[in-house]
């Protein structure tokens, strides 16, 4: 479709009226005889599994079978069900195919499109009932989700602005510019109760109001798309599936605070998100949604992309601002806050991607409607990147106040391989553990803080009885030590000392006094570090100490790792009663740490083997090569 400049608000409404039927087929609102739409997941996970090639193959076979005029085939954003990707959705008959590869393209065109047959091999099978499910809405993974920030992901083509407009895109901006003053915009945001989804949970409307109060000829809106938490991919997926929502929200924020420039700070490791965001900005600029006198009003605003080098500390707003200015990414002492003196010392607001993705909905449907979702102090939904020992790894958006039990067992499909749930880490390196006793606590900002964790940006790592909690704390400390900017002593030196103590514990070299030292030092770092990274870095240590102290004591007192994860405290053994004397273990050992004994094996002509403990590097090769499972850790 050609891109024509939209000069007035009336022209936008006319364009919407012309386009609003564009998504009827995808929404299942059109007769199947009209056309078939095939949407191929184009998120990073599916993209890595050749979804782009899959799309090309579908187009090729549609031409080969002479149905190219009957079908429309396009890439869309992440459907969220990453465990089952690549995903293909066919509309309007609501067919949801999982784990589709390029070699499956011909079957989809031939059998589904040409012959009108349902390909049952490609359907999701409910493990609880063995039922094959055709519709996305009937899959348990989606039943308790409520997609607001992700509303367009999996629906629109993220590279076609007309599809965004067809789903009420930029109508929130039109409403704001036509009927509301900047103060009314801020009041509506405050009424919605939207809190920042980047980790701090500060009220978005309050942040906007602070910036609006400071008088300056230049102000800035910054979108924080740095997203550095291990296992987190919420913001990336939104930008890949619906970059236009973020663009529209930044324009509205600029109007509210009196800013005419916005910057998206995004890590360079997100090439697909950068590509689609760049396309969205260019299209919005060409159509007149960015630039001077937007939609014929006095509001002017433009957006530019700034690349980050992947420093975790640049997720902190003052470090991010410093990086945009071309300086070393280090946090600054607050106050002054960015709302007063931010980018180039001008009033600045910093909101993350997910926060901004909610903004157009608030103005389209009203703050009161948005505030009906969630809890009293945590309104709306939250997007979580569900990962770890969970059956349904993926991106989920659920109402605030849902319990962890519902997320794990109803949405996530339970723990992998039938193991037992042990803990969930929320908030990444800055967060803490949620344990069995917290499974039924409503998840929101305040409840998580009360149990020693935090919402964070939305990483949710599920752990089972195979995880060692001391090792988990050590993993996050290793990350924090690596990512510390080094500006303040508590974070630069204190976290290294924490890591040293944790390393001693996992090697069986610590004593009980080290646990007291660990706790004392953690609290000192929390109280004295300069920024949120340092202040929250000890959280994984403190929460695991609090809820899993018995594991720490087992490591220190008994020199034993209950989960058999800490290699220094484990050893491999060969069960002589099971050994058949085949010698597979010895032949495959990379360090020749296994030798034959003079004891007869099950086969009397052969002899059992034993592991020389001091030489074993505990690589596990012997265990994997033993045909009778006679070797165990």
Image: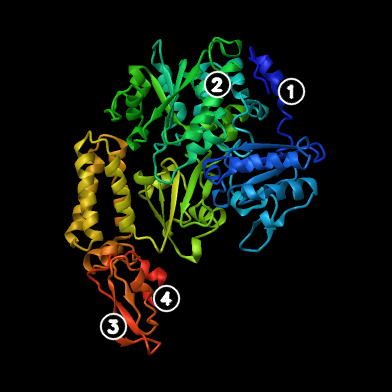
Residue 602, position as x, y percentages in the image: 40, 87
Task: Measure the C-alpha gap from mark 1 to mark 3.
Answer: 83 Å
Residue underneath mark 4? 629
Residue 127, position as x, y percentages in the image: 61, 62
Label 3 sits on a secondary structure element that is strand
Q: Is residue 137 left or right of residue 414?
A: right
- Local crowd at mark 1 within 10 Å, few (<14), some, or many (≥20)? few
Q: Is residue 176 left or right of residue 454?
A: right
Residue name at image x 62 percent, y 37 percent: 75
Label 2 sits on a secondary structure element that is helix
Which circle marks residue 359 in the picture? none
Residue underneath mark 2? 282
Task: Measure the C-alpha gap from mark 2 to mark 4.
Answer: 60 Å
Earlier in the chain: of badge 3 and badge 2, it is 2
Task: Between label 1 and label 3, give the one nearer the viewer.
Answer: 3
Residue 102, position as x, y percentages in the image: 63, 47
Label 1 sits on a secondary structure element that is helix
Q: Quadrant of residue 159?
A: top right
Residue 423 showing in the rendered view: yes
Earlier in the chain: of badge 2 and badge 4, it is 2
Task: Measure the C-alpha gap from mark 4 to mark 1.
Answer: 67 Å
Residue name at image x 78 percent, y 52 percent: 117
Earlier in the chain: of badge 4 and badge 3, it is 3
Residue underneath mark 3? 597
Residue 355 showing in the rendered view: no
Nearer-the-camera pick, 503 or 86: 86
Residue underneath mark 1? 18
């Amino acid at each position: 479709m050609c891109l024509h400049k939209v000069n007035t608000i009336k022209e936008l409404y006319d364009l919407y009226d012309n386009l609003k039927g564009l998504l009827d087929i995808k929404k299942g609102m059109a007769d199947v005889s009209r056309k078939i739409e095939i949407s191929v997941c184009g998120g990073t996970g599916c993209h890595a599994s050749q979804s782009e090639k899959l799309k090309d193959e579908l187009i090729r076979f549609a031409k080969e079978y002479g149905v190219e005029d009957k079908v429309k085939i396009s890439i869309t954003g992440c459907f969220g069900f990453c465990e089952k990707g690549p995903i293909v959705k066919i509309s309007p008959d609501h067919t949801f195919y999982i784990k589709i590869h390029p070699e499956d393209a011909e079957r989809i065109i031939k059998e589904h499109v040409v012959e009108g047959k349902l390909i049952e091999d490609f359907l999701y099978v409910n493990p609880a009932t063995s039922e094959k499910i055709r519709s996305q809405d009937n899959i348990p993974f989606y039943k308790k989700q409520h997609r607001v920030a992700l509303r367009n992901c999996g629906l629109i083509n993220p590279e076609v602005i007309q599809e965004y407009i067809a789903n009420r895109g930029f109508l929130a901006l039109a409403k704001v510019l036509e009927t509301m003053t900047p103060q009314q915009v801020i009041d509506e945001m405050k009424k919605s109760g939207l809190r920042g989804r980047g980790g701090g949970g500060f009220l978005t409307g309050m942040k906007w109001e602070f910036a609006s109060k400071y008088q300056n000829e230049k102000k800035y809106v910054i979108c924080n798309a740095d997203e550095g938490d291990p296992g987190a991919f919420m913001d990336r997926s939104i930008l890949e599936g619906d970059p236009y929502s973020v663009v529209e929200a930044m324009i509205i924020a600029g109007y509210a605070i009196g800013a005419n420039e916005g910057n998206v700070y995004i890590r360079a490791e997100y090439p697909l998100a950068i590509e689609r965001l760049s396309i969205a900005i260019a299209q919005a600029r060409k159509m007149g949604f960015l630039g001077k006198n937007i939609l014929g009003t006095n509001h002017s605003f433009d957006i530019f992309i700034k690349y980050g080098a992947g420093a975790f500390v640049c997720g902190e707003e003052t470090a991010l601002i410093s990086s945009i200015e071309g300086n070393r990414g280090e946090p600054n002492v607050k106050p002054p806050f960015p709302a007063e003196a931010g980018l180039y010392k001008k009033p600045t607001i910093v909101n993350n991607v997910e926060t901004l993705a909610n903004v157009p909905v608030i103005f389209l449907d009203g703050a009161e409607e948005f505030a009906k979702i969630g809890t009293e102090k945590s309104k709306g939904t939250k997007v979580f990147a569900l990962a770890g020992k969970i059956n349904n790894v993926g991106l989920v958006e659920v109402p605030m106040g849902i319990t962890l039990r519902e997320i794990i067992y109803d949405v996530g499909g339970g723990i992998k391989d039938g193991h037992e749930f042990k803990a969930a880490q929320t908030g990444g390196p800055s967060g803490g553990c949620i344990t069995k006793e917290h499974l039924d606590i409503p998840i929101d900002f305040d409840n998580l803080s009360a149990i020693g964790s935090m919402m964070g940006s939305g990483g949710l790592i599920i752990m089972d009885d195979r995880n060692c909690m001391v090792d988990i704390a050590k993993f996050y400390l290793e990350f924090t030590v690596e990512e510390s900017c080094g500006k303040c002593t508590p974070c630069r030196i204190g976290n290294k000392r924490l890591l040293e103590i944790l390393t001693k514990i996992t090697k069986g070299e610590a004593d009980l006094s080290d646990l007291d030292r660990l706790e004392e030092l953690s609290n000192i770092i929390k109280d004295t570090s300069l920024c949120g990274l340092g202040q929250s870095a000890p959280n994984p240590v403190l929460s695991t100490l609090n809820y899993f102290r018995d594991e720490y004591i087992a490591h220190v007192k008994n020199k034993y790792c209950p989960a058999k994860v800490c290699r220094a405290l484990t050893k491999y053994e060969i069960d002589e009663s099971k050994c058949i004397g085949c010698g597979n273990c010895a032949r495959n050992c990379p360090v020749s740490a296994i030798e034959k004994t003079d004891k007869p094996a099950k086969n009397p002509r052969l002899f059992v083997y034993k592991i020389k403990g001091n030489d074993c590097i505990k690589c596990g090769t012997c265990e994997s090569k033993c045909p009778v499972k006679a070797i165990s850790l």
